[in-house]
Each structure stands twice: as C-alpha cells, then as structure tokens.
Image (cartoon, rainbow, N blue to C red):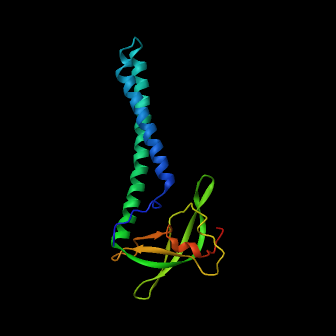
Amino acid sequence: MENQKPKHIGNPALRIAGWILSGMGALWLALGAAFLTIWANVPMDEGEAWVMGAVFAGIGAVMLLIGLTLLLADGKKRKHARRLMAEGTCYEAVVVNSYHSNTRVNGRPGLILECRYTDERGEAHLVKSDAQYRFAAFYRNSTEPARVKVWVDPYDAKQYFVDVGDPLLADGSVTHDDR
C-alpha cells in the first residue's frame, strides 16, 4: 500500500499554537540577545541591560520550548498515523456513538467518534477517534450508520488510527450522546 499523506491527520489547534509560540519565542529570544550584546554598550546601568536581556531571553526560551514541543507532538502523531496507513491493516468500522470533547476550537467543541470493527478472527473491537472539528460530514439524514476506516497495527491492536476524513462518512448518520 502506498504511503498516503492526508492533511486531516493531527490536531490543527496544536499545530497553530506551536507555530505561533515558536515564532514569538524566537522573537523574544532575539530581543534578549540584542539587549545583552548591542544595548549593553549604551551608557546605561550595566545591571539594567543584563536584567532586561535575561528576562527577554528567558521568556523567549520558554515560549520557543513550548511551541517546539507542541509541533513535535503533532508531528509524532502524524507520523504514527502515516505509518499505520502504510503498514497496518485497514478495517471498515461502524460509528456507534459520538460525543463532544473538552477542548474547543473557534468556540466549537471537538467531536469524538466511537467506532466498532470486526477483525478477521471475528472479534469485535471498540475504538475512539481523536477530537474532530469538521462537523458537516457527521450528520446526514440516513438510516444507515456512518462508516469510517480504522487502520490497526497488525502486531498490537491497541495501536490504531481512525480515519474520519474518508468519504465513507458521506452517506451515514451518527448517534450523538450529549455527555
């Protein structure tokens, strides 16, 4: 199977926050370095320039570290999903329930889908998707349940990825639970 790179994998909120914090952290770190090098030569109390530089550099380093951590976490999740899509087993799953997550993006809570699939041995498995923020595809006027693809690691069934960006969702309905 070819290595697919769908764009819907990962959390867009983490990615956006990571880029913003990384950019702001780099800016503050540069300002701190400027205070420590350039403005230290200006006739000012040496303590002030050093303190200002240390404060700006410290804030910038913390923001940069948090931003890069968020970007690395999202990248790790995307790499894991791509690996499962390339090497894992694909099952068609039925969406049995949905409920809102605790996180919000643009004032909307994410939607978590509970899906059930049956493996080749006939065992039923219940899996959950990550929080999804694309609501339009989940609610359709149909009597048939919605279907999604679940990619499972062939050696560890606990390692899975629910692909909600697949067109299989287009013709199904989802039971919603207001938890």
- Quadrant hosting residue 95: bottom right
In this rendering, the answer to whether 118 lies above or below 43 is: below
> Residue placed at 46% from the left, 51% from the top?
15
Extreme top residue here?
A: 43
Q: What x and y, as percent, mark residue 46?
A: 38, 16
> Residue placed at 38% from the left, 69% from the top?
85
Extreme bottom residue here?
A: 122
Left or right of 133, for residue 55: left
> Residue placed at 42% from the left, 55% from the top?
74
Q: What x and y, as percent, mark residue 171?
A: 58, 75
Q: How many marks?
A: 0
- Quadrant hosting residue 35: top left
Which quadrant holds the C terminus? bottom right
Left or right of 174, for residue 32: left
Left or right of 32, for residue 11: right
Q: What x and y, as percent, mark residue 160?
A: 42, 71
Which quadrant holds the N terminus? bottom left
Q: What x and y, as percent, mark residue 151?
A: 41, 73
In this rendering, the answer to whether 121 lies above or below 36 is: below
Left or right of 142, for residue 166: left
Judging depth in this view, the residue of 1 and 163 nearest the camera is: 1
> Residue placed at 43% from the left, 50% from the top?
70
